[in-house]
Image: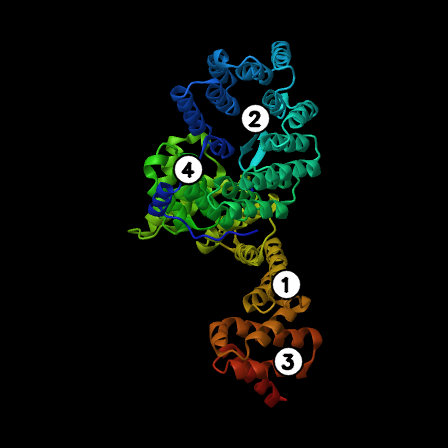
Amino acid sequence: MKNKHPLLGPLAVVGLLVTIQASAQTPAPDAPTLMNMGRFDEAKQKLRQDAQQNPGMQTYFNAGYGYLRAGQPDSARIWFEKGVPSDEKRVPLNETGIAITHLVQNNTTEASAKLADVVKKSKGKNADILYRIGEAYTGYLTPDSGSIKPRYPRVVNAASAIDYLNQAAERDKKNASVQLALGDAHYLNKDAGTAVTRYESALEMGMDASRVYQRIGDIYWQGRNLNLSVENYKKAIEANPRYAPAYRQLAELYYLVNRYKEAANYTDQYIRVSGDRRADMLLRSAQFHFLANNFQQAVNVIDSNRAVLAQNPIVYRIEGWAYSSLKQPQKAIENISTFLEKAPQKAMPDDYKYLGRAYLAQEGFANDSLKAQNDSVGIAYLLKAAPADTSENLYSDVAKYYYRTKKHPQAVAALDSAAKHGFKADMQDLFRYGMSNYTLGFARDSLGKLQRDTLRFAKADSALALAQQGSPDYSPTVLYRAKANYYAYTPEEAVRNGKARPYFEQFIGMVADKEEERKRYQKDLALAFKYLISYHELVTKDQTARADWLKRGLTLLPNNTDLAKIATADTDDSTDQ
């Protein structure tokens, strides 16, 4: 649950109607653009239809090429074989395609023989044949979750690619596609500078500027120069605002650096511009909106595209998590439970985290017993998720619940588990840990007799001392430090060791001038004054200090009978003398 867990993002969120309208107005992408977007099924369909309607050397090759780029060399070979009879004598284009299918399948012997044959037939002079072979040795760089990777990594041979592509460039000096492939080859050869130069040459030769800038952006991305990558993706969009791949690359880049709002916005722009309403893209939009804490929009994307997304159980997870964050616990429970029923093998700790929180957020029960049963289910789910969650301290949530319901042993145990799992306690955790231990310090034996647990009081004081560092002006922390040091001993021992003294003094100073707090803490103030009076009587023997604390106590608590008795006794003693 790491989140996978950190540059820009205009455009507001796009609704269903806007998406449909924009899609209707946007020209359908051509096959190369579809392949550049990773939409190979649509590209293959276009190329296949063209080959069927206009059979010929080039159309058959294009159809096979679509399958080749999609990672289906066997299907590609079928189309190349159909095209072989249409090949020209000195341009064995489809034979080259067949040879390449063997190459990418690592059938080295067959591939070498066939490649040598097509080079021989074309006398090594046909730029297109040389280009196709050279491009094949790049493994065909392909979009993959925003980055670019070779479709066939095992066939990559940058040196061979550069050799064939340079030969092609010598014979066709104005071929932008050759320059683009050379850029890919030099990138694979770990020469990004030359790669960018070749891409720029492709641009000068008339290659679509958006495609070139996207490619340059891809190269900078792989080199982790994300600022230049973003700059070039934006250039691609400026050159053609309808060039969809650049939007998608930007979305994935922002996702990579945890800029989820921008990732969601650019994903919506990609969907609007491309008309790409595949389930995985719509799901990506919902996921990014969720990660951006735009929970309602995540739900809206799913609800507006229910027919497309209904077959993927992940949508129930996203909606469940979103509803949990939107404080709609019943819908959260329904959706997450549905997900766990439909895809139990995909369950993960976060499912139980959101499910647990949803149960705890439920209200409106007929009685306390039903509420307690419901809450116990929620706590069980949180405890199931907690050991695997390294980003959120779910033990803290559990401890908060137990502390609020006065189940102090469980609260302490939960916070002990948090520490064992490497979570640093925050101020509230420390306060609860201290207060729960303080409460447990008043132990009773089997006969119900009070037995002070000194260790518990010591743990309380240690935790409250750390909490006090984080919030020095919070008077209850100081008060219970005083009381922990007082009740850990018999009254006389507590007075004589003086451990509670500085905290009682500090507490009085914190609340003396605050009328509401004086009323709230009357009993505690009385204890503090009596302690300090006794301390100066028994330990310091400082009668002036003793008298001063008594006077201050009577001033702040004029109706306190214990202090009045002390004052009366002092008067009687004085009279007797």
Q: Which mark is residue 151?
A: 2
What amino acid is labelled 2 in the image?
A: Arg
Earlier-in-chain disc, 2 versus 3: 2
Residue 214 visible, this angle: yes
Disc 3, SS: helix
* Neighbours of disc 3 within 10 Å: few (<14), some (14-19), many (20+): many
Earlier-in-chain disc, 3 versus 4: 4
* Neighbours of disc 2 within 10 Å: few (<14), some (14-19), many (20+): many
Residue 554 picture location, percent across and down: 54, 82
Disc 4, SS: loop
| Label 3 – label 4 distance at C-alpha | 83 Å
What amino acid is labelled 4 in the image?
A: Asp
Disc 3: which residue = 546
Disc 1: which residue = 469
- Between 484 and 345, the residue placed more toward the observer is 345
| Label 3 – label 1 distance at C-alpha | 30 Å
Mark 2 or 3: in front is 2
Residue 65 picture location, percent across and down: 51, 22
Disc 4: which residue = 276
Look at the picture and state if 229 lies above or below 112. below
- Between 47 and 390, the residue placed more toward the observer is 47
Q: Do the residues labelled 3 and 4 touch (CB within 8 Å)?
A: no
Query: Quadrant location of the C terminus?
Result: bottom right
Which quarter of the figure has residue 311? top left
Look at the picture and state if 264 lies above or below 87. below
Look at the picture and state if 526 lies above or below 414. below
